[in-house]
Amino acid sequence: MDGGGRLLRSLSLHQGVQLPAAPAYAGSGAIAVPARTGLPARRATPRPRQPVRVAERGVAGRAPRFLGTVLLLLFFGIVGLYGAVRGGQYETFVAMQGDPRDLVARALGMGIAEVRISGFVDLDKTEILQIAGIDPRGSLPFFDAAAARERLLAAPLVKDATVRKLYPNALSITIVERDPFALWQRDGEVFVVAADGTVIDQLRDERFARLPLVVGEGANRRVVAFGKLLESASPELRAHVRAGTLVGQRRWTLKMDNGVDVRLPEEGAAQAVARLSELQRDHRILDRDILAIDLRQPDRVVMRLGEEAASARAAELAKKPKQAKGNPT
């Protein structure tokens, strides 16, 4: 064996076979042994070709087309929006056209084109729309129905409310109003109150002028009793009652439209009113020159005369002959 691990054979075993002289390789320092001649040549076994792998870049590795243009436009859009906000143009646009999202929703046919309102009596449609905050610049998807209901419930005249969205472009509002029962005057201000005395609202117009008026501390909690008291009066007498004043939170004094005060008892006030109705029907007592009528005593009527009536009464009494004192002698 040589130093390379190869088996050395004697050349004498292959007599008659001439070997060509080995070429010399200058500077290599090695001796090349040529292949044996006369032996069948071996065919080199072809090595199997390895498949060529081509690296393909997928979508994740490829930048989308026009990405640079889109980013550039987005940048300019943000800069323009910032400038509009700082300059006030955005607020002007929103005030005129509404929020951009509402603008898009309206373009898709989901604006607020119809509002169906039911249950209102003393309120009108314009007031309800204003209280609920319904704006034609808004849109149905972004309209806050719960907040609109809360705003309606905060209105003094509204007892309950329901707000529903009806897609694609309608709203439904159902109102339950408080029942105004009377007017209550306190400290120079007049309020509309319910039957339980709850203050509904301050009197702002003439729509509630038909309601009975009560005056005095605590009179708002006695409006039902005052209403029953008026029921005992005749229609003619009831038409002359302007207000009822609660005195000491115990009894009523009727204020008539001609300025006459009718003082009623704490107990039996309905009977006293019925008696006043008879006096008006039979004697036209309210048409006389009197300032007050006192019905607090069940067996008599005490009247306070006016200035002219008092003067006439005094003159009449002066004309009567005076009875001599003692017996004549």
Image (cartoon, helix red, strand yellow):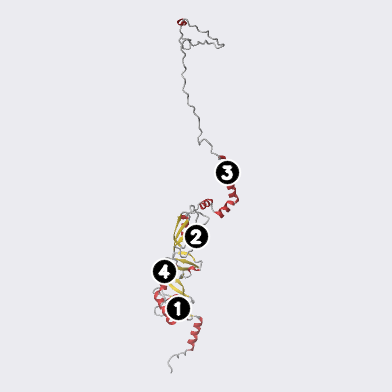
Say if 231 sits above or below 134 in the image.
Answer: below
Which residue does the numbered mark 1 point to in the structure image?
Answer: 293
Please give the residue where the numbered disc 3 appears in the rendered image. 73
Which label sits in the foreground, 1 or 2? 2
Q: Which residue is drawn at 50% across and 60% down?
A: 129
Q: Do the CB atoms of the residues marked 2 and 4 lie less than 8 Å apart?
A: no
Q: Nearer the viewer, mark 2 or mark 4?
A: 2
The mark nearer the N terminus, 1 or 3, is 3
Secondary structure of the residue carrying numbered label 2: helix
Q: Earlier in the sequence, mark 4 or mark 3?
A: 3
Q: Marks 3 and 2, how far apart in space?
A: 41 Å
Amino acid at the residue labelled 2 = Leu
Tell me: residue 134, above or below residue 236: above
| Mark 1 touches mark 3? (CB < 8 Å) | no
Q: Position of residue 210 (x, y in %)?
A: 47, 70
Any mark on residue 224, and which?
A: 4
Tell me the number on the disc at residue 126: none
Q: Distance between the residues labelled 2 and 4?
A: 33 Å
State the SS at label 3.
Answer: helix
Callout 3 amino acid: Leu
- Distance from disc 1 to disc 3, alpha carbons, whole Å, reads 89 Å
Q: In this view, does 204 lie above or below 305?
A: above
Q: Nearer the viewer, mark 1 or mark 3?
A: 3
**Image spot of residue 260 (x, y percent):** 47, 77
Disc 1 to disc 4, how far (Cα)?
24 Å
Q: Position of residue 81 (x, y in %)?
A: 58, 48
- For marks 1 and 4 on the same chain, the one whose residue lies earlier in the sequence: 4
Residue depicted at x 59% and y 49%: 84
User: Label 4 is placed on what type of residue?
Assistant: Val
What residue do we see at 44% from left, 82% from top?
283
Classify mark 4: helix, strand or loop. Answer: helix
- Any mark on residue 129, and which? 2
